[in-house]
Image (cartoon, coloured by chain):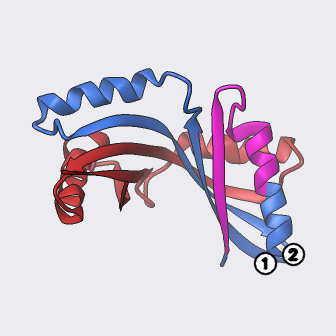
Chain colours: A blue, B red
Amino acid sequence: MKTFRASIDVMPHDNLLDPQGKAVSNSMANLNLAEISGVRIGKHITLQVEAKDKQTAEAKVDEACKKLLANLVMEKYSFSVTEG
Amino acid sequence: MKTFRASIDVMPHDNLLDPQGKAVSNSMANLNLAEISGVRIGKHITLQVEAKDKQTAEAKVDEACKKLLANLVMEKYSFSVTEG
């Protein structure tokens, strides 16, 4: 068995409002950062997986995203898996 | 002025406990995903910046992270900036 590291991004769907991101966008102007807009905030998750190969590790991470890490009604996810 | 997209990860410091990640790690075993461990949960932020070049855009994003997006006492951040 090898150890793989996964890096997962869970973001609100593009066509969904993101009130937290909107609030941060609005705050940027007050900090002299009016050049910044369109802030969207999601989750970044890192974890380790034990698996016999990269394909199996990716399948496990995908399962974890579907079952627990992302709410697929409101969120989309993407991930990358690297060995070691 | 060009538009740049920034992708920012804000994570709890390595030597800090992450209770949310710990809770998720423990839940994995109940979902037949005992191969997964060491879950750490942070924020993933995407935004747009108007700037004359990439260097200026990176400086603006760095400023936004320091001033608003990350709490440097408890969190570390990393980001990448791409044009368009």
The CA distance from mark 1 to mark 2 is 6 Å
Determine the image quadrant of residue A21. Answer: top left
Q: Is residue B11 left or right of residue B2?
A: right
Total numbered circles: 2
Which subunit holds the residue at mark 1?
A
| Residue B78 % position (x, y) | 37, 60
| Residue A14 % position (x, y) | 55, 33
Disc sitting over residue A52 in the figure: 2
Q: Is the residue A24 above or below the residue A10 in the image?
A: above
Determine the image quadrant of residue B80. Answer: bottom left
Quadrant (top left/top right/bottom left/bottom right) for the C terminus of chain A: bottom right
Assign a secondary structure to mark 1: strand
Q: Is residue B38 left or right of residue B13?
A: right
Residue type highlighted by circle 1 = Lys
Q: Is residue A50 left or right of residue A36?
A: right
Q: Is residue A77 magenta?
A: yes
Kindly identify which residue carries mark 1. Answer: A2
Q: Is residue A80 magenta?
A: yes
Residue type highlighted by circle 2 = Lys
Determine the image quadrant of residue A11. Answer: top right
Q: Residue at x 35, y 56 (%)?
A: B76
> Would residue B70 be visible to someone looking at this image?
no
Q: Nearer the viewer, residue B22 or A27?
A: A27
Magenta residues, as a range? A61-82
| Residue A79 % position (x, y) | 65, 56
Q: Residue at x 16, y 30 (%)?
A: A29
Disc sitting over residue A62 in the figure: none
| Residue A24 % position (x, y) | 30, 30
Marks 1 and 2 in Cβ contact (< 8 Å): yes
Q: Residues within 10 Å of mark 1 (few under 14, many from 20)?
A: few
Q: Residue at x 13, y 35 (%)?
A: A31
Q: Residues within 10 Å of mark 2 (few under 14, many from 20)?
A: few
